[in-house]
Image (spheres, rainbow, N blue to C red):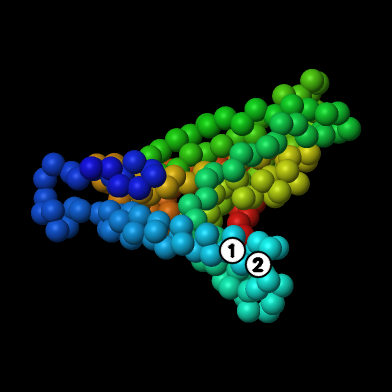
Amino acid sequence: MPIGEFGGAPPLVAEGSPALTTPMYWMYEMAHASLNPARAVTDATKLLFQNPLNPWSRTEFGKSVAAGCELFERTTRRYGKPEWGLNDTEVSGVRTPIEIRSVWEKPFCRLLYFDRKLSRPLRAPQPRVLIVAPMSGHYATLLRGTVEAFLPTHEVYITDWSDARMVPLTEGRFDLDDYPRCPSWRRFRSWRPHAIPSFRSR
């Protein structure tokens, strides 16, 4: 039965012991679902202590309670993936539209290319840069400021990691040992010297 707002954990594989194949994501989803009543009470408490009609809202105690409730709500909130919001950039003084497309894709990662629709060819090729988004649970779109800064002078690629919870177990495993062997890196090593990428993450 699906658990949580993301439609549940990956399905079990056909073979193997359930004790070994049952993902811990189910427990994560159930733990998050169990917080829903506490989140509702916390949200109501925050509204109560932020209400200007409540005399406690102007006291240090009331502000501390409201701040604590807001911290709990933000810590347990599920954040959706933000949009890139990069529709155009300026290349050699000319406003140029951008198309974001996937040039390589595997279950655990996509390689996105920010294709600048140039109205005329450039005098000299611009360097290519690969931005390696961190695998720390953050969305690659949080690096859109870095992407935006590179777009006027570089051909930009970025790794867009998938949420491991949404990848079926049948697709195999992917851990830190597999990370440096990701096939997308080989694509860049085959480029000419002036196109050697810069690896950037934060």
Q: Position of residue 25 (x, y in %)?
A: 31, 55
Foreground: 48 or 31? 48
User: How far apart in space, not on screen, are marks 2 and 1 (Cα)?
Assistant: 7 Å
Hey, which residue is sitting farthest bottom in the picture? Answer: 60
Amino acid carrying label 2: it is Asn
Q: Nearer the viewer, residue 40 or 81?
A: 40
Q: What residue is pinned by disc 2?
A: 54
The residue at which mark 1 appears reads as 48
Q: Where is residue 88 in the image (x, y as percent from the top left)?
A: 75, 31
Determine whether 93 is above or below 169 in the image.
above
Is 123 positioned to the left or the right of 148 in the image? right
Element class at badge 2:
loop
> In the rendered structure, are the residues bearing label 2 and label 1 in contact, judged by CB atoms less than 8 Å apart?
yes
Q: In the picture, which quadrant includes the N terminus?
A: top left
- Please tell me in which quadrant of the rendered image residue 51 appears: bottom right
Is residue 53 among what the camera can see?
yes
Dot 2 crowding, Cα within 10 Å, few <14, some 14–19, many 20+: few
Secondary structure found at label 1: helix
